[in-house]
Amino acid sequence: MAKKSKAAYMISAVAEQYDIHPQTLRLYEREGLLTPSRSDGNTRLYTDDDIERLEVILKLTRELGVNLAGVEIILNMRAKMSAMQQQIEEFVAQLNSEISRRGVPVEDTQHSLIPVVEVKTPAVREKPVRPLRKRV
C-alpha cells in the first residue's frame, strides 16, 4: 500500500476543484460526512483522505441521487466492511502462520474433517486520488 501525502488543501481550493460552494463543504462537516482538520488559525484543511471521501460523497449525490442520510449509511457500511476485511486478513495470516508453525503440509490435511488450505487474500487496490488543479 502506497503512503499518502500529508498535503492539506483549504476550503476554497477544494470547492473550486469540485465545483461546489464552500457552504456545501461546511454542511457535509456539520452532517458528520467530512471531518477536515484545522490549522492553528481554525482554517479547515482537507487531506487526501478527505478529498477521496468527498469524491465518494459527490458520486453518490450527483450521479446516483442519494440523499445525505443515505450517504451517511453507505459511508458507515463501507467503514464496517473495511474493518471486517482487515479482520479477515489478520485471521487468515494467523491461520497460515499456525499451519506453518506446526509444520503440517497442506497435503496431509486433505482427509481432515475440515480441509486445510493455504488461503491468500487478494491485494486491495486503492483508487488513485486526482490531484487538485494549481492556480496560475
Image (tube, rainbow, N blue to C red):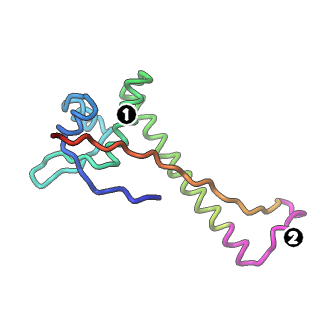
Neighbor class of circle 2 (other Cα within 10 Å; few <14, some 14-19, many 20+) is few
Label 1: which secondary element: helix
Q: Residues within 10 Å of mark 1 (few under 14, many from 20)?
A: many
Task: Give amino acid for label 2.
Answer: Asp
Q: Which residue matches tag 1?
A: 57
In the picture of the structure, the residue carrying the numbered disc 2 is 108
Q: CA distance from mark 1 to mark 2?
A: 50 Å
Q: Looking at the image, which is closer to me, 113 or 39?
A: 39
* Horizontal arrangement in the rendering, residue 99 relative to residue 7 (left or right): right
Residue 89, image x and y in percent? Answer: 59, 59
Vertical order, 91 against 79 (above or below): below
Q: Which sits in the foreground, 25 or 48?
A: 48
| Image position, residue 102 (x, y; %) | 75, 78
Labelled pair 1, 2 in contact (Cβ < 8 Å):
no
Q: Earlier in the sequence, mark 1 or mark 2?
A: 1
Query: Which residues are drawn in magenta?
Result: 96-114
Spot the residue most to the right.
Answer: 111
Q: Position of residue 97 (x, y in %)?
A: 66, 72
Q: Residue at x 35, y 48 (%)?
A: 49
